[in-house]
Amino acid sequence: MKIYRHLIPVLSLLLLLLVIPAISGCSHKDRSDAKEVVKSELDQLKNPDSKTVQKYISYKELFPDATENTRLSNEIKEVFSLFFQKFDYKILDISVDNEKKTAQASLRLTTIDAQALATDFATALLQTEIIEAAQAQSGNTKNSSHSLESHYLILNQLLTSNEYQSTETDCTVHLVNKGTAQKQKWEIKRTRSLENDLVGGLIVCLSDSDILSPQATLAVYLDTLKKMNLDEMSSYLGVLSIMNTSDTSRNSIAEALVSQVHQNFNYVIVSESTNGYNATVTTRITTFDSDAILSDYQTKLDSYIASADAVIDGSRKRYDTSLDLLLESIHSNTSTVTSDVDFVLINDGVSWKLQDEGNTLGNAIFGPLADSSLSDSIDASLDQTE
């Protein structure tokens, strides 16, 4: 009996020594299998094709508010190849829960700077929307900036023309074992969180309604305005409606005034105040001096009306001459005026937008034209020639 009592602890120890390697070996194999699945999947993203990308990131997920396109262009398919050029990963740890048949892989991902890309995208999209608004008011009803394809074309252009730095982020990949004890079958659980992690947070950045601050948003409006051609600016700012005429001769006056904007317009943002979804951005606007133009024109017109030529010319020629004098005063103007203007912006949950954009900017840039005082003065002056 004493012999058996001595043998029991020894046998127990031997049994334990046999079981531990078996358990350890099983756990190590599970971790190894899960790790291989993660490597196999993520390696495909280093040189992805459209099918690989679609496994993890739906083309619609980046821009859920965009209108659908039935056909994906080659440029859209190329975007993710460009995006994942710098993609890399490092597996930090693998943990397995055999009882729940789940595993977790802790990763460190390397992607391009999603914050910078999203900021550039928001800027480019707003620029496109402003230009389209200008063109729509002139009769062009194109509204492609809201389409899914247009969004991806903008991304394609940014990724092609800009060099973005890489950033590192940590994330966790969850796996589930859908196999048996004899045959493991680990699969990565595809979630919206994983989609966002794999693109460096781009999905969250693109959905951030504050990705452009009120100041940055207003700067896009003003910078885009400065680059508009004469037709776009005339339409966007409502110059022809300010002149209150469909007379082709007077349209040339409107074009000359827009040219003055191109020559003299500038701005400096002074301050910003935000209250919830509303913001006021105080901006120092420099533009042409419409009072100086009107004063110069009136002097020239008075001199002409008092001359014998005005009597001889007759009413029609006097009218044409008065327009020529006004155009001359506009073209020769070099005077500018600077004043502070408060711009109101509203966040609609998607982005900051300038309230009543065309009229607001027109009022700030054309000054006295905004209340038709120059138009009325022109009418009164032209009446003198009748």
Image (cartoon, rainbow, N blue to C red):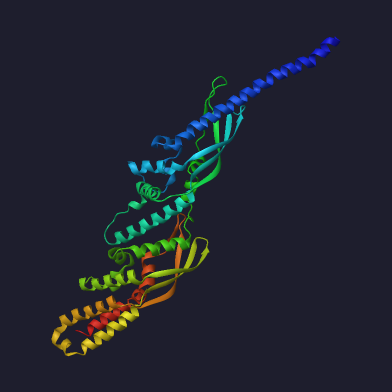
Residue that protrudes farthest toward the right in the picture: 2
Residue 222, x across and y down, in percent: 39, 65
Residue 372, x across and y down, in percent: 32, 76
Query: Along the line of sight, which residue is nearer the eye, 243 or 299?
Result: 299
Task: Inspect this view and state whether residue 213 appears.
Answer: yes
Residue 332, x across and y down, in percent: 28, 77
Q: Is residue 312 above or below residue 11?
A: below
Q: Residue at x 58, y 31 (%)?
A: 103
Residue 22, x across and y down, in percent: 65, 20
Question: Which of the 4 image quadrants contains residue 124?
Answer: bottom left
Task: Inspect this view and state whether residue 354 appears.
Answer: no
Q: Is residue 60 above or below residue 102?
A: below
Q: Is residue 238 above or below residue 106?
A: below
Q: Residue at x 26, y 82 (%)?
A: 380
Question: Which of the 4 image quadrants contains residue 59?
Answer: top left
| Image quarter in which the C terminus is found | bottom left
Query: Along the line of sight, which residue is nearer the eye, 32 or 272?
Result: 32
